[in-house]
Each structure stands twice: as structure tokens, then as C-alpha cells.
Image: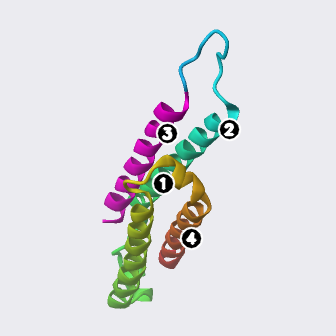
Amino acid sequence: MACSLLGRARAGLDDAEARYGRENIPPPTRANPFPDATIVANAQALERLGREVGALEGLIRHQPVPENDRMTQRYRQEAATLAALAEKDAVLVGQAELLRSMLEGVAGDAMLAGKREIEVGIAAIAATLRERQTFLL
């Protein structure tokens, strides 16, 4: 579920970045062969945010799962472990939904204005993934 939500957030970022480039970067002319540096930097910032969201999706897909061998069963209670993982996963899905709602269908200019909040959301999801990972180790 979280991967699906992050995929939709990534699609929103990619769409906003493409629209931003089409609307703000004019075709090169002989008099002005290069676009404005701030516009290019903004387009690159949207692209970077998209890559970060895509990286989070990859991290979620490769999260560890509880082992089911005799040694692990000896030191860990399965029901308690699964309940704690379900709780962490519910937090993760909530964070992914919040990020998706911030990014899906939003224009690039609005994303750039709220860039700090998007970065905080990405960092919060990464922190939750680290907590989940360390819980299983």
C-alpha cells in the first residue's frame, strides 16, 4: 500500500516537473541559447524530489521481514513482533498518504513553494523505515 501511494506521489512529481519545464523553459534562440539558471535549478529540484520519493519506494520493497527459524523463535515472540510491525507499517502508510496528498495533482510552482514540507515528509518516511529495520535486527 505504501509503495502504491509513493508511486502515485512520484508520478505527481514527474508530471509537475514536465509541466514546469514545458511552461517555463522557452525554446533556445540565437539571442538566448540557454534558459534562465533559476528556472533550470527549480526543474532540477523537482527532479531530485522525484528521485528521492522513488528511492523510498525501493527501500520499502526491500525491507527485512521477520525470520522464521528456531533461533529467532527462541528469542522473539511472533505475535508481539507482528503487532509491532503492523503498527509501524500503519504509520508508514499514513505518512505515504500524506506525502501523496501533498504531491498528486499539484502544480510545480506550488511544489517548489512547499519544498521544505515535502523534504520533511520524505525524511519522516526514511526515519520510519530505519526504525522498522532496526526493530527486526
Provide residue 58's location: percent of width, then percent of height: 43, 53
Q: Real-space Cα distance between discs 3 and 1?
A: 18 Å
Disc 4 crowd rating (10 Å Cα; few below 14, some 14-19, many 20+) is few
Residue receiving disc 3: 20
For the point 42% across and 56% down, the residue is 57
Q: Real-space Cα distance between discs 2 and 3?
A: 12 Å
Q: Nearer the viewer, mark 2 or mark 4?
A: 2
Q: Nearer the viewer, mark 3 or mark 1?
A: 3
For the point 61% across and 42% down, the residue is 42
In magenta segment, residue 17: yes
Q: Earlier in the sequence, mark 2 or mark 3?
A: 3
Magenta-drawn stretch, dominant element (helix, strand or loop): helix
For the point 52% across and 54% down, the residue is 111
- Under circle 1, the secondary element is helix
Taking 54 as reference, is 74 above or below it? below
| Most foreground residue, 124 or 71 | 124
- Under circle 3, the secondary element is helix
Task: Report the residue that reaches farthest toward the front.
Answer: 31
Q: Are marks 2 and 4 in contact (CB under 8 Å)?
A: no
Q: Earlier in the sequence, mark 3 or mark 1?
A: 3
The magenta-colored residue range is 1-25
For the point 37% across and 71% down, the residue is 93
